[in-house]
Amino acid sequence: VQLQASGGGLVQFGGSLRLSCANSRRTGSRSAMGWFRQAPGKEREFVASINWSGGKTDYADPVKGRFTISRDNARNMVYLQMNSLKPEDTAVYYCAADNSYYSTGSRKAGSYGYWGQGTQVTVSS
C-alpha cells in the first residue's frame, strides 16, 4: 500500500476531524497531493490539493474556509484539517498522489495515479 489514509470517524455537526495520509512512495515528497471524497450515490469529487512544496493550495468551494490541507515532506505525510463539519461533508475521503514530479496540484482525479483506500467521515446533525 503506497498511500494510507486515516483519521475518519463519526462527529457531530460543527465538530472537527483531522485526516492523515501516509505516503510510502520513495518520491512522495515530489508530488502534488489531493483529497477527494465520495458520498453514497454520488460521484467522487475534489476537496483540496497541495503542490509538491506545500506553497500552493486549492479548495473546492463547499469546503473553502473550513478545511485546510497541509503536508510534512520530511515525514511524507499530508493532512486535511476539517472544521465546522456539516452533514453534507459525510463521505469516504481519499488521498491521492499526482503522477508527475514537482507538480502544482489539480482538481481532476485523472491527474492522480496513486490512491489511498479511503477513510469514512460521518457527520451527524
Image (spheres, rainbow, N blue to C red):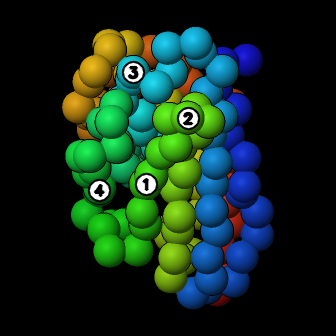
Query: Between disc 3 and disc 2, whose residue precedes?
Result: 3
Q: Secondary structure at mark 3?
A: helix
Give the class, few, some or many, for how many residues have Cα within 10 Å of label 4's Cα (few <14, many ≥20). some
Q: Position of residue 74 (x, y in %)?
A: 55, 35
Which amino acid type corresponds to the residue marked 3 in the rendered image? Arg
- Residue at 72% over, 55% down: 7
Q: Position of residue 89 (x, y in %)?
A: 52, 66
Mark in front: 3 vs 1: 3
Q: Position of residue 23 (x, y in %)?
A: 61, 27
Location of mark 4 (residue): 60
Query: Between disc 3 and disc 1, whose residue precedes?
Result: 3
Query: Between disc 3 and disc 4, whose residue precedes?
Result: 3
Query: Between disc 4 and disc 1, whose residue precedes?
Result: 4
How far apart are the two marked residues, 3 and 2, measured between alpha carbons?
Answer: 11 Å
Location of mark 3 (residue): 30
Query: Between disc 2 and disc 4, whose residue precedes?
Result: 4
- Numbered label attached to residue 74: 2
- Numbered label attached to residue 69: 1
| 123, 31: nearer the viewer | 31
Which amino acid type corresponds to the residue marked 2 in the rendered image? Ala
Give the class, few, some or many, for how many residues have Cα within 10 Å of label 2's Cα (few <14, many ≥20). few
| 112, 81: nearer the viewer | 81
Give the class, few, some or many, for how many residues have Cα within 10 Å of label 1's Cα (few <14, many ≥20). many
- Residue 6, can we see it? yes
> Is 12 placed above or below 66 here?
below
- Residue 44, can we see it? no
Q: Secondary structure at mark 4?
A: loop
